[in-house]
Structure formats: structure tokens, C-alpha cells
Image (spheres, grey):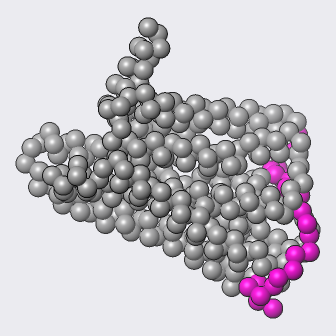
Amino acid sequence: MSGLNQTSTVVPEFLIVGFPGFRDQESRQTLFGVFLTVYLFTLLANMLLIAIFTSDRTLHTPMYILVCGLAVLDIAISTNTVPSLLVLIIVEYRIVPLAACFTQTMFLSGLFATECFLLTLMAYDRYFAICYPLHYPNVMSNSHITKLMAYCPVFGFLSAGGSLVLVLRLSFCRPTNVIYAFCDFGSLLFLACGNIQVTNYVVLCIALSVLCISLLLIFFSYLRIANSVVNIANKEGRMKAFYTCGTHMLVISVFFLTAVGVMFSDRIPSVSMDIRILGVLIRNVFPALMNPLIYCLRTKQIRCSFVKMLRKITN
């Protein structure tokens, strides 16, 4: 029977066993220390970026509203997985009810798709600002960009919900172990029994559609931007446009390269399970860690706002 037609669920819970290759106490303590440090630094860096944005009214523009939204998303994505991983490292295994596992899977996939769409919206914002500078202030107002941002989680969670509906119709009758350190579609499909080929294919197509549509729209936006920048007569204006777009392109590269790398590594049989788990964690944490660093180091206005905020605090 096709995986799409199965409706019964045999097991009521999953046993998450985490890293198969890290069983000794010393290795687990090292892993715990590394992930806790990275998670705390990610939280502090993104919360600092949000604090800089809220404290300086000159940053209340469409571009920085999008940057602030990206920081909120990065906190949500890392918080969805890392705390449960830290608990797992301490206790070695966790029993997770089916509903909780599906909820984590839904949020992980939905937040990831939301960030894809938000990065696409950021590219569209830069495209409009550079290609239509005279119309930009009137069209891309703060209220308009906020409304467009609201569509990102809507479409993101709709795509995740479509995949989840298919997975919910599967039967889970294998030994109740989720090898990954947290629940995701890859783990759930691995544990499903029966013929899941159609479901696996549809879930993969949905994920690839989100990635490919986002990348195509970003590519189209920056292709038009490149054509417009070349025609800017002012050298200073040309360099400013390249610098602003370069920051965004760096953020996009970090996000999509880690996502594509994990997608391919999951389908290489010779890759160990520990490496796959680390790869998924890097995909969830590394962009969230790098984004505030990239924007703070490369954006002069954010650096100046940070200095002003420090002076207010010290005075």
C-alpha cells in the first residue's frame, strides 16, 4: 500500500538517541560545552542586533526592519533545536511523544522555509531600492514591508504543513529510535514502514521547490541590480550599492550553501550518522551565528548605532 494511503500509527512515542559515536563522558561534556557556547553567543548576538534596531529610530527603515526580522527568525530556529540537543547530551536519550515530535518537525521546516522567503524579500527590497530609487521611498514604506514580511511565515508554514500532512498519514512500526538529535522529516520518513517512496518524493519536491523558487527570485533580483549598478555614473554610489548587496549576498551564501550541503550529505550512504547530525546542526546554528556578525561588521550604520547605544548605557 502506498505511503500516502496509510492511516494507522503503531507507536505512540519515539526514543531519541542522539550521537551514536559519542558515548563516553568526556566527549559528551565537550559537545555540551561547544553547543552551549555557540547557542548563547547566537542568542546574545541576535538579541544585540534587535536591541540596536529598537534603540535607534534612524534604523527604522525597510532594510533594517528586514534585518531585525532575520535576527528574530535566527533565534527561533536555533532555539527550536539546540536546547533539546543539550538536554539529550546530558541524559543520553529522550522519550518524545508523537505529537511533540511532529510539532518540532513542523516548526523546524516552517521556520526554515520562512527564512528562505525572507531572504528573497530582502533581495527584492535591494532590487527596488537600486533599480527604482525615486519610487522606493513611496512604495516600500515601513508598513508595506511589514505586510510583505507577514506573508513569509504564512507561505513557510503552508509548505511545511503540506509535508506534515503527508507524513501524518504514514504508519510508524519500526523500532522507536530517532537517530537524529531532534525530530525532522528525514528521521520520520526513515522510521516509517510500508511503501513511502511517493511520500518521500513529494516531501523532497516541496523542500526543493522552496529552495529553488527562492534562489531563482534572488538570482533574478541581483541580475537586474548588477545591470543597474553598472549604469550608475557616480563611482561612490556604485561602490555603496555593491557593498550593501555584498553583505546580503554573503548572508544568502551562508544560508543556502549549508542547506544544500546537508541535503546532499543525507543522501550519501558513506557519510556517518554523527557527521549528518553535525551537518544539520551547523545548518540550523551557523547562519544564525554569522548573520549578526556580518551585519555588524559590514554595515556602518549599525556599527555607529551600536556605539551610540553603548554611550547611552555608560552615561
Q: Quadrant of the C terminus?
A: top left
Who's the residue at 87% across and 59% down the image? 97
Asked if the stretch drawn in magenta spans residue 18, the answer is yes
Give the main secondary structure of the magenta stretch. loop
Magenta stretch, residue numbers: 1-24
Expressed as whole percent of the image width and height from the top left, the position of residue 301 reads 32, 31
> Quadrant of residue 15 in the image?
bottom right
Would you say residue 84 is visible in this rendering?
A: yes
Is residue 103 left or right of 133 when viewed as pictured? right
Who's the residue at 82% across and 41% down the image? 87
Is residue 297 left or right of 21 when viewed as pictured? left
Q: Nearer the viewer, residue 297 or 148?
A: 148
Q: How many marks?
A: 0
The correct choice, above or below, for 109 with respect to 66 in the image is below
Residue that lies at the very extreme toward the front in this rendered image: 143
Who's the residue at 88% across and 36% down the image? 25
